[in-house]
């Protein structure tokens, strides 16, 4: 069972999680990160590192965020691996508490 990045990451893209991942399972898009479910080893190291609490175990993804299981799997096939921590998006602080921002996801 993999971990899943959910809506809170959109337009923030904090990468603290990437820094602790032992298997390089994170993929980077324009304004969002995803976890490759085929690479994730369920180590849980990324969960406490996320400043916006966007990462959940697949079986603990909130009901209103369950579509992100499929979104992570789909986009992980298209986006490149991110191997090191980078600065968050310039306006991340303005977006980190915004809800309902699926329409902001850039593919």
Image (tube, rainbow, N blue to C red):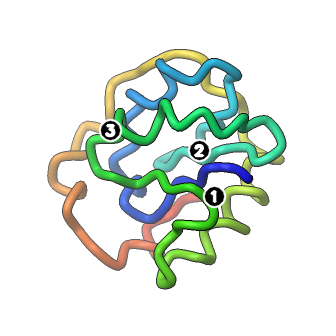
The quadrant where residue 87 appears: top left
Quarter holding residue 49 = top left
Question: Contact (CB < 8 A) between labels 2 and 1?
Answer: yes
Say whether residue 80 is left or right of residue 28. right
Cα separation between marks 2 and 1? 7 Å
Residue at image position (73%, 68%) is 70
Q: Residue 19's x, y, as percent?
A: 47, 19
Outermost left residue: 94
Report the residue at 49% width, 61% height from top.
Answer: 6
Label 3, label 2: how far apart the Cα atoms are: 12 Å
Q: Quadrant of the C terminus?
A: bottom right
Which comes before the other along the chain, label 2 or label 1? 2
Q: Which mark is residue 89?
A: 3
Q: Is residue 50 above or below residue 68?
A: above
Classify mark 3: helix, strand or loop: loop
Q: Position of residue 81 (x, y in %)?
A: 70, 28
Q: Is residue 10 left or right of residue 24?
A: left
Residue at the image position 17 percent from the left and 47 percent from the top = 93
29 up-or-down from 17: above or below: below
**Residue at disc 1, secondary structure:** loop
Q: Crowding at label 3, few (<14), some or many (≥20) Cα neighbours within 10 Å?
A: some
Residue identified by numbered label 2: 29
**On residue 23, which mark appears?**
none
The front one of 42 and 21 is 42
Residue at 47%, 83% in the rendered image: 64
Q: Earlier in the sequence, mark 3 or mark 2?
A: 2
Disc on the earlier residue, 1 or 3: 3
Tell me, yes or no, whether the two marked residues, 3 and 2, touch with CB atoms within 8 Å. no
In this figure, which residue is indicated by the disc labeled 1?
107
Badge count: 3
Indicate left or right for 7 with 83 as reference.
left
Q: Nearer the viewer, residue 81 or 54?
A: 54
């Amino acid at each position: 069972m993999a971990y899943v990045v959910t809506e809170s990451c959109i337009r923030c893209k904090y990468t603290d999680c990437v820094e602790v991942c032992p298997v390089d399972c994170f993929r980077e898009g324009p304004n969002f990160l995803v976890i490759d479910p085929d690479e994730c080893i369920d180590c849980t190291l990324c969960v406490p590192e996320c400043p916006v609490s966007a990462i959940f175990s697949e079986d603990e993804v909130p009901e209103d965020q369950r579509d992100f299981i499929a979104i992570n799997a789909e986009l992980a096939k298209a986006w490149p691996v991110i191997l090191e921590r980078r600065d968050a998006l310039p306006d991340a602080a303005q977006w980190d508490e915004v809800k309902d921002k699926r329409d902001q996801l850039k593919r």
